[in-house]
């Protein structure tokens, strides 16, 4: 999501996309899928501390990819690399390559604001703006200069329906988003993220601050979102990863990606003994 101080995009979105990618499996409909997000030899340092170490991964489109691992293993760092949120940390240094549709997002000609139009993000704690429900959803469209190009009322309704919130709030769009329950606030943040019609939605532990009922609604929503979007979710809850994801990446201490596979394989027959030890609770 763009912020008030960010400038209008100067890079055409088409510059972010190339087609020299290879199929990386099958989607939920059985059709071949291409990698949307690809990392090669990705290293991240915060000052002298290494947060990610030589990460290689291909994340397929229109599937839910969960990223799991113990605290401090680099899960959120990887997520924040995808849409360049780490740009806001002065001590952060990134080496290697992280690509979106084959285009390295850290190339000099990539505008982060244009990138974030294609890659939305939902954070751990619901963070609606102190604005009306309507203005929360419309915010990104306005800031990114898209409000004049779309039917704003229709776009807000579409996003709220996509976040499974429309039926609960359609008669109170002028009310403050801060008046909603925690679970509703998180779904409002999801609506805000999908309003600019991104391709990828990043979620950083989106249910950890919610009660079980609200968390279950978000899990159901994530499953629905994968029909239209590529979803990458960081979660500390392994049961949640097993329930909602199609593929799972396991990061362990030192920022190492030790295994990435179909979720049933990771949880039932992992190739790496360290993954089995982590999943069975022997460490982490």
Image (cartoon, rainbow, N blue to C red):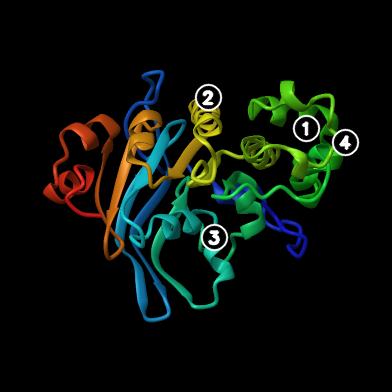
Label 1–label 2 contact, CB within 8 A: no
Tell me the CA gap for discs 1 and 2. Answer: 18 Å
**Mark with earlier residue (1, 4):** 1
The quadrant where residue 30 appears: top left
Label 1–label 3 contact, CB within 8 A: no
The quadrant where residue 49 appears: bottom left
Tell me the CA gap for discs 2 and 3. Answer: 26 Å
Residue toward you, 266 or 178: 178
Q: Secondary structure at mark 3?
A: loop
Reading the image, the residue beneath label 4 is 174
Q: Which mark is on residue 156?
A: 1
**Mark with earlier residue (2, 3):** 3
Estimate how packed mark 4 is, as few (under 14), some (14 to 19) or many (20 or more) residues with alpha carbons within 10 Å. Answer: few
Q: Which label sits in the foreground, 4 or 2? A: 4
Q: Which label sits in the foreground, 1 or 3? A: 1
Tell me the CA gap for discs 3 and 4. Answer: 33 Å
* Residue 260 appears in the figure: yes
Q: Secondary structure at mark 1?
A: helix
Q: Is residue 219 left or right of residue 283?
A: right
Reading the image, the residue beneath label 2 is 224
Label 3–label 4 contact, CB within 8 A: no
Q: Residue furthest top?
A: 29
């Amino acid at each position: 999501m763009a912020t008030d101080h960010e400038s209008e995009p100067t890079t055409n979105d088409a510059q972010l996309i190339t087609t020299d990618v290879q199929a990386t499996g099958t989607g939920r409909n059985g059709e071949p899928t291409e990698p949307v997000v690809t990392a090669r030899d990705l290293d991240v340092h915060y000052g002298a501390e290494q947060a990610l170490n030589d990460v290689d991964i291909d994340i397929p489109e229109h599937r839910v990819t969960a990223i799991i691992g113990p605290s401090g293993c680099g899960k959120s760092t990887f997520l924040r690399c995808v849409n360049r949120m780490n740009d806001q940390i002065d001590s952060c240094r990134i080496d290697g390559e992280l690509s979106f549709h084959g285009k390295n997002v850290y190339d000099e000609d990539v505008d982060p604001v244009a990138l974030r139009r294609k890659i939305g993000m939902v954070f751990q704690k619901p963070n609606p703006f102190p604005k009306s429900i309507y203005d929360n959803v419309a915010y990104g469209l306005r800031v990114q200069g898209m409000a004049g190009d779309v039917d704003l009322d229709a776009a807000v309704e579409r996003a709220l329906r996509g976040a499974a919130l429309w039926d609960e709030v359609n008669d109170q769009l002028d009310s403050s988003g801060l008046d909603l329950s925690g679970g509703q606030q998180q779904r409002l943040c999801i609506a805000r993220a999908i309003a600019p019609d991104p391709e990828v939605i990043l979620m950083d532990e989106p249910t950890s601050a919610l009660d079980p009922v609200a968390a279950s609604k978000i899990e159901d929503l994530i499953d629905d979102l994968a029909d239209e979007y590529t979803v990458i979710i960081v979660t500390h809850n392994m049961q949640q990863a097993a329930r909602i994801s199609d593929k799972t990446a396991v990061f362990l201490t030192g920022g190492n990606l030790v295994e990435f596979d179909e979720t049933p394989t990771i949880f039932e027959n992992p190739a790496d003994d360290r993954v089995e030890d982590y999943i069975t609770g022997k460490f982490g």
